[in-house]
Amino acid sequence: MEGKAPEVRRGHVTGSGRKLKDNAADWHNLALKWDRLNDAGSTYATNIVNFTLQKESGKEASLLASSGGAADAPPVQGLNPSSRELEEECVKLQDVVEKMTRVLSKMEKMASSDQGICALETFQFGDEGRPTPLFHTWSTPHFAAVSSRLCESYRQELSLKRLILQEVAHTSDPQLAMVYLSSWLHQPYTGDGDRLLLEGLLLETGHRPL
Amino acid sequence: MSTHAVATLHQQLRKSFRALADNQRAWNSVLAECAPLLGSLGNLAEQLRALDGVQIARTPLARFPDLRDRLRCKLLQAVDVVLAKLTEKTESLQTVRDAVHGLASAAFQWYEQNADLLDLATCTLRSAAAPSIAELLEWLQDADSYYRQQFLRRRNLLQMLRPDELSELESAANWWASIDSPDGDELISEMLFRVAVFVDSG
């Protein structure tokens, strides 16, 4: 998942293979983009919680100032909460969610294009499908299945993030606020399985050397 | 020949103290890298505790019935990652401890093998430019014992931590800091300062 996918060797693969290979590279890049948006959103969400709790308690929000760390967003301390600043952070978080929505929509288009390739192959080769795999071992429907599984994970994640966006500025319960931040940051609906699928996709299509 | 023996031992001790200075820097830089990791452990423990404390079904998150299990799993994985990093750091600390122990034992071994050539008066003789051989050996031994104790205490603390023991994870950073021994580190710095002229003279 680190770094850009290696340059696609143009002209090496054509037709359905070309399309699947390009989609694999897009998956990789969109997943990276998503992660970058997630990090940015995490910082904004942390700021929102700090502002809200500071307002509530009328003192320094100590709880969430320390919600930073290894994989955690940096803590924010010593800021004077004001409605305007709170609103600014909310707008930034909303912007992140909108960008994520656009990323998901591109992912859905890719999943649908992989489905389309499957349908085309059924048309060309019948229900048995293509006799030999396009790349190494994956059948074309397997590509479509992987795309749609990844889409489903990101869809769940986005739906959780929309809820966090709606609620995070409206809770005075520090524990619940912490759970919101935790849920945003650690992305419970995209797991190691998805990461493996994505890596598998890159390996299969030759973006990663076998 | 006593003069030759003294010169050889002095040369060896100079090398040992130069290496000790390198090891002190290495030790302190590893410790500096550990502090944020322990902070992360505390934060993750706090997040796990918050997750335990919230009744998800009574919050807007109720729409995500499997959230608790999934988030817990993610948080525990994150704890594992931090613990693994800390284990790596412990190995670096162990390398420093072993190196310092090696310096002290090599110097002592040489001294013991050549003790016949080094009488008491020679060993306790000090000058403005050089501490006595006895002092130099003693300081190396002090450094050895300081790093050995520090290492054991830190390793024991890390070995005690378990991903599901939240209160221990939360306290880890404080415990870790309480092992810090400013006096001990000061002792090493001071001995390096006192041997500076001697080390540079060789």
Image: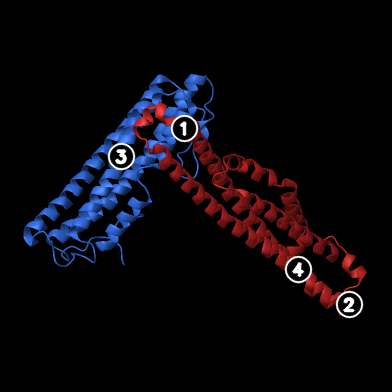
Pointers 2 and 3 in contact (C-beta within 8 Å): no
Do the residues marked 3 and 1 share a common chain?
A: yes
Pointers 2 and 4 in contact (C-beta within 8 Å): no
Tell me: residue B176, above or below residue A172: below
Tell me how far mark 2 sits from mark 4, CA to CA: 18 Å
Q: Earlier in the sequence, mark 3 or mark 1?
A: 3
Label at residue B116: 2
Identify the amino acid type marked 1: Met
Which residue is disc 3 drawn over?
A: A156
Residue A195 visible: yes
Do the residues marked 4 and 1 share a common chain?
A: no
Q: Residue furthest bottom?
A: B1
Q: Earlier in the sequence, mark 2 or mark 4?
A: 4
Pointers 3 and 1 in contact (C-beta within 8 Å): no
Q: Which chain is red?
A: B
Q: Quadrant of residue A136?
A: bottom left
Count of numbered tags: 4
Q: Nearer the viewer, residue A166 or A142?
A: A142
Return the chain for callout 3: A
Q: Which chain is blue?
A: A
